[in-house]
Each structure stands twice: as C-alpha cells, then as structure tokens.
Amino acid sequence: MTAFIRFVLIGGFGFLVDAGLTLLLVSAGLLPWQARIPALLCAMGCTWIANRRFTYRASGSRPLVEASRYALVAFVMAGINYLLFVSLVSVGVPTLVAIIASTACQTLVSFWAYRHFVFGGLA
C-alpha cells in the first residue's frame, strides 16, 4: 500500500507539471489540445525518474529496458488520458476539470502496469 501512496504522490507532482504547463501554454495562445502534448511529455519524464527512485526503488541494472517499457506504458496511458481529455474539452468541460477527470481515470491502471510490466513487481 505504501508504494501506491508514493505512486499517487508522484502522480500528483506529475499532474502539477502537466496541468501547470498546459495552462501556461494555453495562456500563451495554444489551443488546449495542442498545449497538452508537450505538457504530458514533460510530466512523463518527471514521473519516470521519481517513480523509478521513490515508488518502485528500482536498481540500475537495466535502465534502458525499463525506460522503454515505462515509455510504452506511459504513451498508452497518455493516449487514453488525452483522448478522454479532448472528448471532455470538446463538449465544454473546463480545461482543468478535464485534466483532473482524464488523469483520475487512468491512475489505477497505470500503477498496475508500471508495477508489473515495467518494474517487475518491485515495491
């Protein structure tokens, strides 16, 4: 259970990176669905480093394989997150609410996938 709490805390940090950068880029003139792409990429990088070190306490044995698996899971989860986000924004849901809803929907699946597929059952 403590691994899940760490995962949620790091996810909260990733959410702040994602939401903050998305809102910053929207205020700079990008459309929400354009701004979300670089924001998600930045959040993914931040959360990989933090999850690797603090949530799953992975050793340095195969970081390239691990990073590749993390990226695969992250991109699939980001795709689901992004499609839900775009769907919500397109029907008039405010940007921040859409970010919260789309992120919440993929959190549990992400934890399971990272734990079993990326970090090999660690934590």
Image: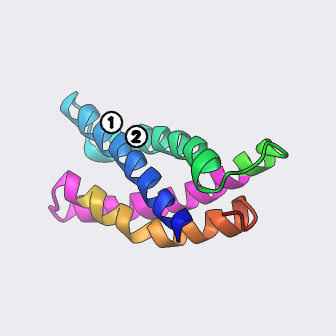
Q: At numbered mark 2, what does the secondary structure look like: helix, strand or loop?
A: helix
- Could you tell me how far apart the alpha carbons at marks 1 and 2 are, in whole angstroms? 5 Å
Judge left or right: residue 19 versus residue 54.
left
The residue indicated by pointer 1 is: 21
CB of mark 1 within 8 Å of CB of mark 2?
A: yes
Judge left or right: residue 60 versus residue 72.
right
Query: Which disc is residue 39 wearing?
Result: 2
Please give the name of the residue rendered at 33% of the width and 44% of the height, measured from the top-left corner.
16
Provide residue 21's location: percent of width, then percent of height: 32, 36
Magenta part of the protein: which range? 69-97
Please give the name of the residue rendered at 42% of the width and 47% of the height, measured from the top-left corner.
14
Please give the name of the residue rendered at 37% of the width and 40% of the height, measured from the top-left corner.
17
Q: Amino acid at mark 2?
A: Ala
Q: Amino acid at mark 1?
A: Leu
Provide residue 50's location: percent of width, then percent of height: 55, 44
Query: Outermost residue toward the right?
Result: 61
